[in-house]
Image (tube, rainbow, N blue to C red):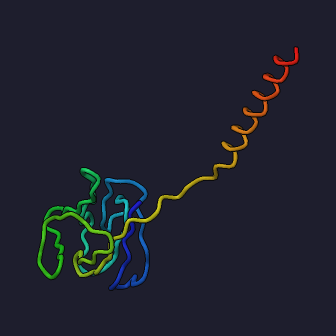
Amino acid sequence: MVEFVIESGPDNGKVLTCPRLPCTVGRSRTVDVRLEGPGIWERHAEVTTEDGRCFLRVVGQATACRDGVACLGWGLRNGESFMLGGVRLRFAISAAPHGSLRPLEWAAWTAVGWVVVVEAWLALG
């Protein structure tokens, strides 16, 4: 899962997450990550993955800056700050949520118990 921490603009401090890649970023209700602020287009950028790395690609005539230089796309680094339109964001890779393993563990121990019972029955019978 990837996160975008807003560092400027009307939603400063807000964390936006995308549980899957590729994902789209922009103002539209149809994108995966909705971002409001000056200079943000309906469909501003896309984040994809290739060879285990995340890449940001600007869509159409939208603008993005990395280290103060206008860019059309680049490989994202964890913790990196950049600008989309007039909004500063920080990219982060967050831990994936994990479900409980308790039911699986219970099933495994139940199966082990049954194996022990059957082995004992065979040995004594």
Q: Closer to the camera, 7 or 41?
A: 7
Point out residue 80 in the picture as x, y percentages from the top left corner: 28, 75
For image coordinates 24% across by 74% down, the residue present is 84
Residue at image point 16% right, 64% down: 73
Residue 62 x %, y %: 17, 69
Residue depicted at 85% across the width and 20% down the height:
121
Task: Please provide percent x and percent y for residue 45.
Answer: 24, 64
Quarter of the rendering containing residue 111: top right
Nearest to the observer: residue 89 or residue 101: 101
Q: Is residue 80 above or below residue 42?
A: below
Q: Position of residue 54 (x, y in %)?
A: 27, 59
Q: Is residue 120 above or below residue 30?
A: above
Residue found at the very far top of the displayed protein: 125
Q: Quadrant location of residue 79?
A: bottom left
The quadrant the C terminus occupies is top right
Q: Is residue 114 above or below residue 3?
A: above
The residue furthest right is 125
Picture quarter containing residue 46? bottom left
